């Protein structure tokens, strides 16, 4: 559940888009949602922040146990196109993407530079959450992506799952950056930064 106003507005947006399918009438339109974490290198995200702090000689760490999902701009765009091509209306599409540990990100960007624990900020989570355990009862595995389906749909659920070979996740399943099965290593982080953020980056 959201713990700050920003998160609450994103949740509200998700629910408004999903519910719009029930009031569209006879209009040929579908409303669906894509959900993912911060894009690598985007304004205000941690990678360019750490690169800047590296030059200052100190890397601030909010919490040493913190983890985050990792998605490139290309990965985000691919997901949007997937949703545009495959949405039936009302889905929340969730990508299967790797995580990184914040301390390993700091090591990847600024090896040998001291870190300082500055404490978690108000409303900040230790782990990014994509699917809560409460969402698990309406969540399905489509292979490349997860999808959270609305309780009430304008189409047949069995036909949907057959079309996408979808399988229901285990009740109580949750998907966050801390319990993820896929992680990027320090070397992989460096390669991704060169590929997606700064081609001139060196550790």
Image (cartoon, rainbow, N blue to C red):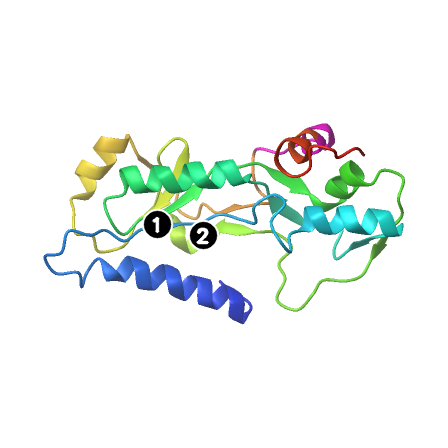
Q: Residue at x 61, y 67 (%)?
A: 123
* Residue 139 shown left or right of residue 163 in the figure: right
Reply yes or no: does residue 202 show up in magenta: no
Task: State the residue position of label 2.
Answer: 133
Q: How many marks?
A: 2
Residue 86 x, y percent position in the rendering: 28, 38
Instruction: Point out the residue furthest to the bottom here.
Output: 5
Residue 13 x, y percent position in the rendering: 39, 63
SS type, badge 1: helix
Quarter assignment of residue 16: bottom left
Task: State the residue position of label 1.
Answer: 137
Q: Residue at x 65, y 40 (%)?
A: 100
Instruction: Point out the residue furthest to the left here.
Output: 26
Q: Residue at x 58, y 45 (%)?
A: 177
Q: Residue at x 74, y 55 (%)?
A: 63
Q: Residues within 10 Å of mark 2 (few under 14, many from 20)?
A: few
Q: From the viewer's side, name the closer residue of 85 and 88.
A: 85
Q: CA distance from mark 1 to mark 2?
A: 8 Å
Q: From the viewer's side, name the closer residue of 162 and 171.
A: 162
Q: Of the numbered discs in the image, which one, if any, rests on residue 120?
A: none
Residue 169 can be seen in this image: no
Residue 112 x, y percent position in the rendering: 89, 39
In the rendered image, which quarter contains the C terminus? Answer: top right
Quarter assignment of residue 95: top left
**Magenta segment range?**
182-190
Q: Residues within 10 Å of mark 1 (few under 14, many from 20)?
A: some
Q: From the viewer's side, name the closer residue of 135 and 4.
A: 4
Residue 77 can be seen in this image: yes
SS type, badge 2: helix
Residue 173 x, y percent position in the rendering: 45, 45
Above/below status of 195 relative to 104 = above
């Amino acid at each position: 559940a959201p713990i700050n106003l920003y998160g609450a507005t994103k949740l509200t947006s998700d629910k408004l888009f999903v519910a719009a399918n029930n009031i569209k009438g006879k209009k040929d339109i579908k409303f669906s949602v894509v959900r993912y974490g911060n894009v690598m290198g985007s304004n205000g995200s941690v990678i360019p922040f750490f690169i800047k702090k590296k030059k200052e000689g100190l890397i601030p760490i909010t919490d040493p146990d913190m983890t985050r999902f990792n998605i490139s701009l290309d990965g985000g765009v691919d997901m949007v196109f997937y949703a545009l091509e495959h949405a039936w209306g009302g889905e929340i599409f969730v990508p299967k993407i790797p995580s990184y540990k914040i301390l390993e990100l700091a090591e990847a960007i600024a090896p040998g530079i001291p870190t300082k624990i500055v404490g978690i900020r108000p409303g900040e989570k230790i782990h990014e959450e994509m699917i809560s355990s409460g969402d698990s009862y309406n969540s399905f595995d489509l292979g490349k992506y997860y999808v959270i389906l609305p309780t009430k749909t304008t189409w047949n659920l069995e036909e949907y799952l057959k079309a996408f070979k979808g399988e229901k996740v285990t009740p109580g399943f949750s998907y966050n950056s801390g319990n993820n099965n896929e992680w990027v290593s320090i070397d992989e982080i460096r390669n991704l930064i060169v590929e997606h953020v700064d081609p001139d980056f060196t550790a």
